[in-house]
Amino acid sequence: MSNYCYIPPEQKDMICCLSLTLKTHEIAYHTGISIRTIQRVIGQWQKVGHAFRKPLWTGRPQAFTGYHISASARLKNP
């Protein structure tokens, strides 16, 4: 079992807005989100300009078999 809890984008925006006037521990007290999570969201916002992480890829990684590798080699070298 993990400690992961999804934080919606609207709540991340609220954290960023609150960080302009409140301290991290005050935001944690009012929102019920851990201090470390708030620090991570604020750090992402300060570094990139938004608090949302886009995954590099989605879905399950595809396992290639020998057939797939030989087929792609034939496409590259006709």
Image (cartoon, rainbow, N blue to C red):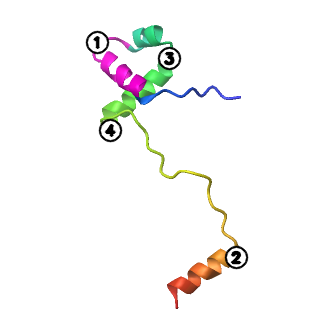
CA gap, disc 4 to disc 3? Answer: 21 Å
- Residue beneath label 1, please? 21
The mark closer to the camera, 2 or 4, is: 2
Q: Nearer the viewer, residue 20 or 8?
A: 8
- Residue beneath label 4, please? 48
For residue 66, the mark is 2
Magenta segment boundaries in residue numbering:
10-23
Tell me which label, 4 or 3, sits earlier in the chain. 3
Q: Residues within 10 Å of mark 1 (few under 14, many from 20)?
A: few
Mark 2: which amino acid? Gly
Quadrant in the rendering for residue 25? top left
Mark 3: which amino acid? Ile
| Residue drawn at point x = 46 percent, y = 13 percent | 31
Mark 1: which amino acid? Thr
Q: Position of residue 50 (x, y in %)?
A: 33, 34
Q: Position of residue 8 (x, y in %)?
A: 46, 28
The mark closer to the camera, 1 or 2, is: 2
Mark 4: which amino acid? Val
| Residue drawn at point x = 44 percent, y = 22 percent | 38
The mark closer to the camera, 4 or 3, is: 3
